[in-house]
Image: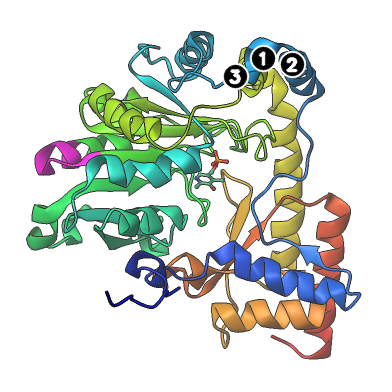
Amino acid sequence: MRKKPFSLDPPERLKKLPPYLFVEVDRKKRELRAKGKDVIDLGVGDPDLPTPDFVIEALYEGAKDPKNHRYALDEGLPELRETFAAWFQERFHVKLDPNEEVLPLIGSKEGIAHLPLALLNPGDIALVPDPCYPVYKSATHFAGATPYLLPLLDSNDFLPDYSLIESEVLAKAKLLFLNYPNNPTSACVTKEFFKNSVSFAREQGLLIAQDGAYSEITFDGYVAPSILEIEGAKEVAIEFHSLSKTYNMTGWRIGFAVGNREVLKFLAKIKANVDSGIFQAIQFAGIQALKKGRNAYQKNVQIYQKRRDLFVRGLNRLGWDVPMPKGTFYVWIPVPPGYTSGELALKLLEDAAIVLTPGNGFGPNGEGYVRASLTNREERLEEALKRIEKIHSGKAF
Ligand SMILES: *Cc1c(COP(=O)(O)O)cnc(C)c1O
């Protein structure tokens, strides 16, 4: 019998992926640090502030209990689902059935990544904002489906314009990703936009997956709505939530999908074959975090707001033209004339040891922007502004 040679050629679904954005940025950053440079990292969106102590205490307690050392239930502890439903009702005034309309996730990224497998056939289309959190696109590819990019333009307040989508695309589209407050543009929406989106989804037979990872990080009195506040939304929408950004718990891996119960059942079915739930001690810690609610994160939000004011005002004093974001901990910076996103990011990296994420890494319509993450102390942001000012006085942008 002839043997075929062993081959480590990656499968098509891997070949199709661009390098994961933050991995590339991270590699460059490490290179500079290895050369002894004092790098200011405004690249990755990961809170610098610690997880609150009472959450850590709850983890200790949970970790000591042998009952928590075994496989967790796939659908999460009933108490976790009930606590999230109570948090959601208090926050958005929407009632969720904790048994069927709340699905705990190992971080919302996990749920986002599995959703296309739960909904799409090969050849289907997922409507994906451009620029966007990269997982919407890669997860769509993994399901053998095709992402169709919806430009998010400044001229339309970084909202997709549904009227521009061709009917042949709509005929094949099954899923629409939304993400407000938005990463990377930091755009925020009114309920009106969600209402239009729900109508559009109903007309076109689409399922909306709205990513609410930043729902609690908003400024100047703006309160982010949930898409589930719209009447009838549960028929056509799910929403992702996460403790990661709200409670400084990115490393812990705990999030939720809420909304349409059929879709959550499909997603749970995929998950049952992939993972075995969230470590129960983390679930107990998450319960404590949710019970504390706003009191656990209000201060953080104020810290981000002060950093935002300092950084955006500082750039604008130098003659940049940067709008003041109402939500998220990102600043979406239009690049000064004469530069591409990549050129500006490279210049700031090489001349000022400042890491920013080039906007085109989030999709073609991110070209012309760089994203700065406010996950640094005020002193560091001030230092970044000083370094940028120095470049200005040396050779103007
Ligand atoms: C950070 C982030 C997530 C992932 O959050 P986890 O719950 O930690 O997986 C999801 N969506 C967006 C837009 C994010 O920026």
Q: CA distance from mark 3 to mark 1?
A: 21 Å
Mark toward the viewer: 1 or 2:
2
Q: What is the span of residues highlighted in magenta in the rendered image? A: 199-207
Q: Quadrant of the C terminus?
A: bottom right
Q: Please provide percent x and percent y for residue 395.
A: 78, 91
Q: Is mark 2 within 8 Å of ligand 1?
A: no
Residue 330 visible to the viewer? yes
- Name which residue type carries label 1: Gln
Which sits earlier in the primary sequence, circle 3 or circle 1? 3
Determine whether, in the image, residue 218 is placed left or right of residue 123. right
Q: Which residue is mark 1?
A: 288
Q: CA distance from mark 1 to mark 2?
A: 7 Å
- Name which residue type carries label 3: Arg
Please report the residue visible at 46 percent of the width from the left and 71 percent of the height from the top.
Answer: 18
Q: Which residue is mark 2?
A: 58
Between residue 184 and residue 22, name the one nearer to us. 22
Residue 317 lies, with reference to residue 263, above or below; the image says below
Please report the residue visible at 83 percent of the width from the left and 68 percent of the height from the top.
Answer: 39
Q: Which residue is mark 3?
A: 70
Q: What color scheme is it? A: rainbow
Tell me where residue 217 sits by quadrant.
top right
Please report the residue visible at 78 percent of the width from the left and 76 percent of the height from the top.
Answer: 31
Q: Please provide percent x and percent y for residue 390.
A: 85, 79
The reply to whether the C-beta atoms of the residues labelled 1 and 2 are less than 8 Å apart is yes
